[in-house]
Structure formats: C-alpha cells, structure tokens
Amino acid sequence: MDCRAPAPAKEHMTLIDTILLAALVGLLIAAYLDSRPHLQLLLAADPEQPSDHRSLKALGYFFARKRATGAVKRSGTLRDLGDGRWQLRGELPKSLNGRRRRYTRNFHGTKREAERALAQLLKEIETQTVLERPVTVNDLLDRWLSEEVEPTVRHATYLDYQRKANTYVRPLIGDVKLVQLTSVKVEQFRNALLKRRIHTAGKARGGKKKVQEPAKISHTTVKSALKVLSMSLNYARRHKFIASNPLHDLKRVKWQGNGKKKALAVDELTAFLQAAQGNYWFALFAMLSNTGIRPSEALGLKWGDIDWENGWISIERKLTLLPGGVFTFDDPKTEDSKRTVPLSPKLATILQAHLKRQEELRAYDEELDLVFGDLSGQPADSRNVLRRHVKPIAKRAGIKRSVTLYSLRYSFMTHSTNMSRAPKLTSRVMGHKTVTFSEDVYNDPDDEALRESTAHMDAFLPDPDVDSEGEEAA
C-alpha cells in the first residue's frame, strides 16, 4: 500500500514556504532602512577606537523621527551632554537655495523628559512656529523690514518705515521681548511718544550755532510711529509669533489737528499766487493749483509729456528722492494715477513763459527734459522749494497758517468741486480711484459753499412778510 502524500499537498507546502520567505525578506529590508541613521553614525566614527566607544550610547546620540500625516517627515537628534543636559536638534525645511538648516535647543532634565521635549520640538517645526522666531521687538523689526517691506514696496517707502522704526520704536521698546509686549507696554510706549521731545539742529549764524529748544513730537508723527509698530506686530501675528496684536486693544485717542483746514481759502490762494509772480517756481505753483497733480508728479514731468496742440498733460512718472542726493523716476502711486489732465489756455501760456526762462538761464537739460528742474536742469528737491520759496511767499501774502505744496492740491479739489459741482471729474483729474476718497480726504468746503448749501432751501420757506399768526387770529 502506497502511503506517500498526494502531489497537491506538496505544492501547497511550497506556496507557504514562498510566502514566509518573502515576508522574511521584507522584514530584513525594513530593518535595514530603519537602521540607516545608526549605520551612518557608526561608519563616521573613528575605526581605530575600540568598538565599545563606537556604540550609539557612548557617542551620546539618540534618534527620533516625527511621522506627519502627509508625506513630509521631520527628523531630530537627542545628544547627551552629561549632568542631565541634553541638546535637541531638529531638521528645518531647506532654504530657497537648497541648503540644509537645523534648529538646536538645549534642555535640562531626565532622558524621558528630553525625549518628550524633542517630540514637541519636532511638532513645532512641523507647524512652523519655531522657524527663526524673533525674540525682541528689534528682531521683529529687522525681519519685518527685510522680509515683507523691502520686497513689496517702493524703496523710498521702505526707507521711511526704517527711519521711523529706528527713530521712535527701537529706542523705547526695541529690547522688550515679544512675549512680554502686552497692552500695558504698548500703552506706555504711546504715552512716552506723546511726552517725548526731540532736538532739532539750528542754523549757524555768524559762526555760532543757534540753540533751539527741544520740541514735542506732533500727533501726526506719533500716529506714524504707532502705524509702523502695528504693521510689524500684524506680521508677527500672521506668522504665529504672537497670538494677537496688543495695539488693537488700546483705547482710541482723539488726535489733534484732524479738524484743521488744509485747503487755502479763495482769498488766500489768490494772494499766494499773486505774491509768487516773478518767482522761478511760479509755473510749478500754477500747475499744482490748476490741475491738482501731486508735487512728485509735477517734478517728474517732462516737456515731451505736454500735448500743446490738443491741450493735454500726460502723467507717466513721479520723482523719488533718496538719501544722499540720489533720485529715481518711478511709476505713479497707483494705476489710476497714470492719466491725462487738461491743459487750460492760461496755464499753457505760463508754461511757455517758464520754458523761455529756462533757456535764458540755461536751466534746461536736454537729456532729462524736465519741466520743473532746478537751475542746472537736474531734479529738484521739494523740501528746498518748500523751505526757500513756499514759506517766504506765504508770509509775504499774509497767510498766517502753514502752507505746503500739497496745500495747492487740496485747494484744487475744494474750489474746483465747489465751482463745477462735479466731484467725479475733479477726482479723476487728481488720479483718485474713488470719489469717496477725494471727498473725505481732500474736499474742504469753504464758508461760501456752506452758505449756498442752505440758501437753496429758502425756496421751501414761506414769505416772511406774511403774518400767518395774524391771519389765523382773524
């Protein structure tokens, strides 16, 4: 009798052996992949040292890996420094140029506590809350200016923010840690700015320097400094460096100066332009008051931008002055600022006379082709024009309040709107996107316009000669 097992059973055993062999190979491969960091460390050790010194424990390294839900995996190391001191190290995402980056933190405690701290560190790296976290307000300002402001705004704007940060924010709270910047701290910072006095350099007369009393910072300057701090804190909040912006919790301050009239009255504007006749910059003042363009746009205007035949002026650029006497020609402030404005016949005559005077004084540079260049044809500094010409002219005209180049732009918006009753057209000439902004910021109705607004309602009032009470009594 044949007692041998049937053939199918032998084939079944062969299939099981194959499955077991494949599983064993898989386990070996997994073990090899999991031990690669350990093997690298062993291979990097000095082979001349005894084997026990090349062990992982002797080297003081323990490896950990945080497995994220996605495909990204962050690894870290835990190094024993002795006496309960540990060094935690985590791999940061690579920089834009592909270089590896690491974050290191020291810890004191037991091994189990250090392992938990390493796991927390890897979690923070995954949520990007540990990447180059600024510690103080100075650190935040440095990062905000370099990472967000400089790449996204004009260079002149960047320099202005940098100056305000260095002048007003850093000296008072620059060393304060972000975690300690509470609402009380920022409130004290604001109050200190309101009380702070600054020293201004006086002019030297007769070999002696004029001594000037320190002046308080204006409310406008305080608002600008708070704006810079608030923008940097908003940047920190978006990057999860802080939970909220402490400036948002401050009580609103009623700032002084918001109710002051910025536009010149009719008699003031007339007196100013009459007193400016004969001045080299009279054409500039006439242009600003007649068209309402920005001073920077006027100083960047070229003769080639004027269409004498059809009576139009093309606004294509603006002049930007940088520290050190450097200047650039940039695009206008917004897309709506690229526009054409009408050239009135009287303004055209004034500009032609200005061109003739430029040629007589040899104040024209063919390469720059500037309409309002200085006496050498180079770009003019608006601050010099304000200090040496606008202020003295306003004083001769008997105007007691402050007058700037922007006062002429405000005056155009106010008087042109009052006379034409078409704020939409005036806003377009000024290069604003909406009429609402022009009306809220620039339009400053004079007393006559206010009187007219109520005079029209007289038509609904009864004739004052009729004694209505007497008629009822009769």
Image (cartoon, helix red, strand yellow):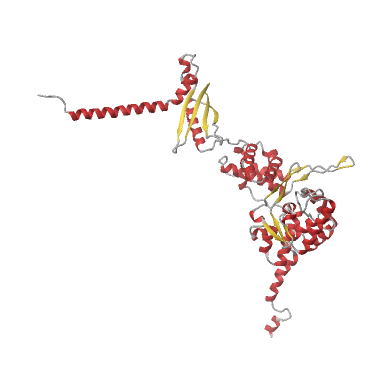
407, 314: nearer the viewer: 314
Instruction: Confirm whether residue 443 shows in the render.
Output: no
Residue located farthest toward the left when viewing the structure as drawn: 1
- Residue 284 is situated, as x and y percent measured from the top left of the image, at 78, 56
Q: Say which of 113 and 343 sits in front.
A: 343
In the image, is 45 to the left or to the right of 235?
left
Residue 416 percent location from the top left of the image? 72, 64
Please tell me whether residue 59 is drawn above or below residue 387 in the rendered image. above
Residue 162 falls in image quadrant: top right
The quarter of the image holding the C terminus is bottom right
Residue 36 seen in this snapshot: yes
Q: Is residue 364 left or right of residue 46?
A: right
Residue 16 horizontal/vertical position (percent): 26, 29
Q: Quadrant of the N terminus?
A: top left
Residue positioned most to the bottom = 474
468 or 387, which lies in front?
Answer: 387
At 71% from the left and 79% from the top, the residue drawn is 463
Q: How many marks?
A: 0
Residue 117 falls left or right of residue 264: left
Give residue 326's quadrant in the image: top right
Quarter residue 308 falls in: bottom right
Residue 342 pos. (x, y %): 71, 62
Going by the picture, which residue comes out furthest to the right? 206
Is residue 439 depicted above or below 300 in this figure?
below
Front-lying residue, 139 or 154: 154
